[in-house]
Structures are given as structure tokens and as C-alpha cells.
Image (cartoon, rainbow, N blue to C red):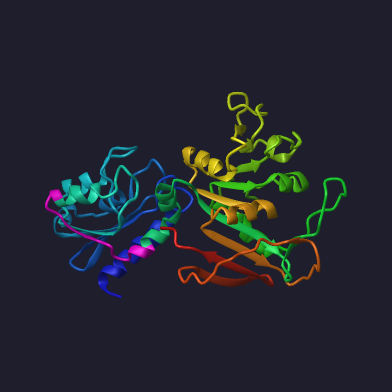
Amino acid sequence: MNQEEIYMKRCIQLARNGQNTTSPNPMVGAVIVCDGKIIGEGYHIRCGGPHAEVHAIRSVKDQELLKRSTIYVSLEPCSHYGKTPPCADLIIEKQIPRVVIGCMDPFAKVAGRGIQKLQNAGIDVTVGVCEEECKELNKRFFTFHQKKRPFITLKWAQSADGFLDGKRSPDDGKTAIRFSNPESMTDVHKLRSCHEAILVGYKTALLDDPKLNVRLWTGKNPIRIVIDPLNELPEDLQLFTDGGQTRHYTTTETCRYPESANDTVTSIRLEKDLPLLPQIMSDLYQCGIQSLLVEGGARTLHEFIQADLWDTIRIEQAPMLLGTGIPAPALSLGTDKNLKIGTKQIGGNTITYISRPFI
């Protein structure tokens, strides 16, 4: 590992401090180096606040040192006026002679313009140090801007013989079989806190009446998404009555919860003759939702897999055997060598993660 990679990895480390507070902006870290020593650091703390470069520059006690320093930043400095002025302009103003960038910004208002502005000012610019790690840091942000949809995580828990649950109906009074243990359930709520929205299908909403919020971890509750094509879900479900934000998708002519009539629940009508999932992804994109966690049920998960709408899959497997029940979704991963597959143990359950390239 060379010195430039060491400084860029420090940028990435700093950037992670802004996880869950910067969206819809990306996480960014910046390090300023003069004569082989770090003289300033910063990261983007929250959306609407100063960017990483601003915090790093402000942290330098002797501002004259900036004129012979290098600033390392994990993402291309912005070049446009948003909630804050352009960071590229600040770098030029401070006469920093060299900028090292982890990766380009896919956001249309930046996308190379920051680099060009710096170069036009005579600044030496290097791009691509630890590039893949910098892109991985903001995979949700990159996916949203490049694929025009949220970054999608599918999640389910299953028995050792591959069943999600026993067979149930709304009238038999049976509750879902629990595969998660206290430790893995905490991990699930941590996962929820990292996503802006969480989705279930009609049957899961009907049978389980879930809250779909963050109770066992700190963080903001995701927006709940429920697919109810025929507008048949009972109105007393927690998704509709507990005061949390819910988007209710249906194909019926009459929307049960018009946007103008309800502060927390909104019904969105989909075209019944067109595939539903692309319509939902388009709506979430228009709403600026960058990450989506899909928690079930079996049919909904299967439809996402069949539509090739997923970026990461989390599968929790408990050691118990059911013998019969609702089969877990079938995955056909083939021989794709670009997939990343990892496992870990949580409280006796095996958690498998499957991730595909996001760009």
C-alpha cells in the first residue's frame, strides 16, 4: 500500500462517520497533507451542512500551509451551488495546488465538472486512488443515480431445509415461525436503520400485521411500502394506523389514502396492465428514495428475483428443520464470478450475504 492509498483509506474511514445522516447526499471524507504530515481532516456530517472539504480546510490552523498542500477526497468535489457553495471553488480560492480524488461523482450536476473546474484553474488533479473502495462506500448513491432506482436489499430467514414458514391463512390463528434469535433480530433492525424504505407484499401485511420499524437499534424508521393490488388490506393494520410513513400501492381506480387527505399514508395507483415492480421503482426514484429493504413474503421476493431487481441478498438460516411449508426463494446465480458471497454466525444462525456489482 503506497502513501496515497493510506491517505485515501483515511478519507473513507472519516466518511463512514456520516452514515445515516448525509442522505440523500453521499458520505465523503477529506484529508489535507503538507510535507508528509496530515494537517487537516473532515467529513460530511449531515445533509445541508458543510461538505468534507470545507471541514478539512477549516481544521487547518495555519491557512498559509494550504498553498503547498495536497487535499485527498473520497469523491469528486462539487462544482455547483446547492445547499452549500461549490467545494471546487473553495479549493481554488485557497490555492491548494494538488487534489487527489477517489472516484468521480455520478450526480449529473457534478459528473466530471468539478475535476474540469480544478484543472482549468491549473490545479494538479489525480483521480482513481482506491476507486473501487470509494465507490463501494456510496453504493446506494451510485446505484440511485446510475440505475434510476433505489439500491435494493432482499432479506429472508429460513429453516435448514429451505422453508420460510409453515402454511397459514388469515383465519387459522397461526403465527409466523420465528427463525431469528435475539442477536440476529438486533442485526435485522440495524439493517433496517440503514435503508430509507422497507417493503412487504399483500400477504405478509395481512398475516403478520408488521410494524416494519427500528426498535432494537438506533436510527430513523424507514418509510413502509406495501403492495396491495386489489386494495383489500384491512384499514386497521399497523401500517395504516400507527402514525408512521407508509406508501400503499394499488391498481384499483379508487385510492384509499389520497396524498392530500392523509399526512402519513399515501396510496399510489399503478397501471394493472403493466409490470408493477418497475412502476414502484420509478415512483421511489421520483421520491428520492435511494435504498430499499424487501422483507417478504415469498411471492414478493420471488418477483424481485425474477425481475432481476436486487443488489444484495441477506439470508438467515436457522438450524431447525420444518419438513414442509412455504419454500424459500430459488436463486440461480450461475457461474457469475463477480458475485461476492460471505457468511457469518449470529447466535447460532448462519447469515449469508450475496452481493453483485452495483455499477
Instruction: Locate the N terminus by quadrant.
Output: bottom left
Q: Residue at x 39, y 40 (%)?
A: 48
Residue at position x 70%, y 44% in the image: 202
The magenta-colored residue range is: 120-133
Residue toward you, 83 or 111: 111
- Asked whether residue 125 is drawn in magenta, I would say yes
Which residue in the rendered view is the most extreme toward the top?
261
Task: Pick whichever, 112 or 229, lies toward us.
Answer: 229
Percent across and percent down for residue 344 are 59, 72
Q: Residue furthest right?
A: 172
User: What's the residue at 62%, 32% (across, down)?
Assistant: 267
- Residue 160 on the magenta segment: no
In the image, is 203 to the left or to the right of 227?
A: right
Rendered view: 208 above or below 38:
above
How many callouts does the rendering have? 0
Query: Relative to 124, is 266 above or below?
Result: above
Q: Residue furthest left?
A: 122
Say which quadrant the C terminus sits in.
bottom left
Residue 344 visible to the viewer: yes
Decide: is 198 above or below 15: above
Q: Position of residue 330 (x, y in %)?
A: 65, 63
The spot of residue 14 in percent (x, y) is 38, 59
Which is nearer the eye, 31 or 77?
A: 77
| Percent coordinates x, y for residue 126 in the rendering | 21, 61
Determine which quarter of the picture holds residue 225. Answer: top right
Residue 10, picture quadrant: bottom left
> Is residue 297 something one can see in this rendering?
no
Q: Which residue in the rendered view is the most extreme toward the front?
A: 273
Quarter of the figure with residue 256: top right
